[in-house]
Image: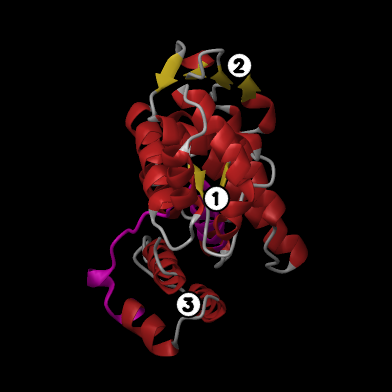
Amino acid sequence: MEPIESKHRNHFTNLYLIAISDGNCHSCELDFLYDLGAKKGLSQEEIFNIIENPHKARFIKPENLHEAIEQLYDMGQMVCADGKIHPYEVDLCKSFSKKFEIKEEVIDEVVEKLIDEVNGRLMKFNNEKSELIINDIIAVIESKKQLSPVEIDPKNRILLSAFNNLEIRLNPLAKSVYFLFLKHISDGIYLKKLCEHKSELLHYYCTISNKSENEDIIKTVNDLVDIRSNTIHENRSRINHEFRTLLDKNVASYYCIEGSRGEPYKINLPVHLVRFNN
């Protein structure tokens, strides 16, 4: 996962591209950039180097949808910062949205809503950032996106029923891991506490592999829950790779097991779309 300092630098660079899109970077836009850069933890030297070397600036794609909309929000603030909304800046916001892999059929609606909301908020609330606006924009995108229920059938197959019963094929151990995270979809699981779920994993592994609990199965599961082992990460990688291979990247993100160090790992699919029929 990309270091947080690098993400902030990339975000700042993307915003600077917006600022110079009309051929002129106004003082209020520079003030906004310096203020935002400082809030993101960038040094004055880092900010200066980016601004003084526009020929080296290049677009860097965010890692996920929420991060993309956060950047678009700040771009909206940049567009409105000088009190004038330039068509070139709006077009660049739309271009960035496309690069962020937002579907073309909603880009116009997303950017227009974003700029209207940001412009109204700047006038009323003195530049206060609102998570509500970001969530509203995400809701617009999600409303256009079809997600399929995950159905576990009596044969323990993982099927995406709305996608022509597409089957996600995993080996028994990886499938056991996925079953576990589906069962804990609301709260997720801290990987350092995976050992607390050993009995569940043993149950799933025996059921899926159609074997009785034995020494080899116990050893395999013990290795999986051992935080000194890389086994859980290897299986999580197999699972995520399978979804990303078969589905659109943005859709696949809802089915993958994701998380950050110190935070619970989870599947970001709505709970009502998980169905165990086995």
Q: Amino acid at mark 3?
A: Leu
CB within 8 Å, label 2 to label 3: no
> At which x and y percent is residue 215?
45, 41
Identify the image's colour scheme: rainbow, by chain, secondary structure or one colour: secondary structure
Q: Which residue is mark 1?
A: 66
Q: Quadrant of residue 247?
A: top left
Residue 20 image offset from top left, x and y in percent: 37, 66
Residue 206: within the magenta? Answer: no
Query: Front-most of 183 and 79?
Result: 183
- SS class of the residue under badge 3? helix
Magenta stretch bounds? 51-77
**Residue under pointer 2:** 278
Majority secondary structure in the magenta region: helix
Q: Circle 1 sits in a helix, a strand or a loop, which is it?
A: helix
**Residue pointed to by mark 3:** 30
Tell me the kind of residue under disc 1: His
- What residue do we see at 68% from left, 55% from top? 131
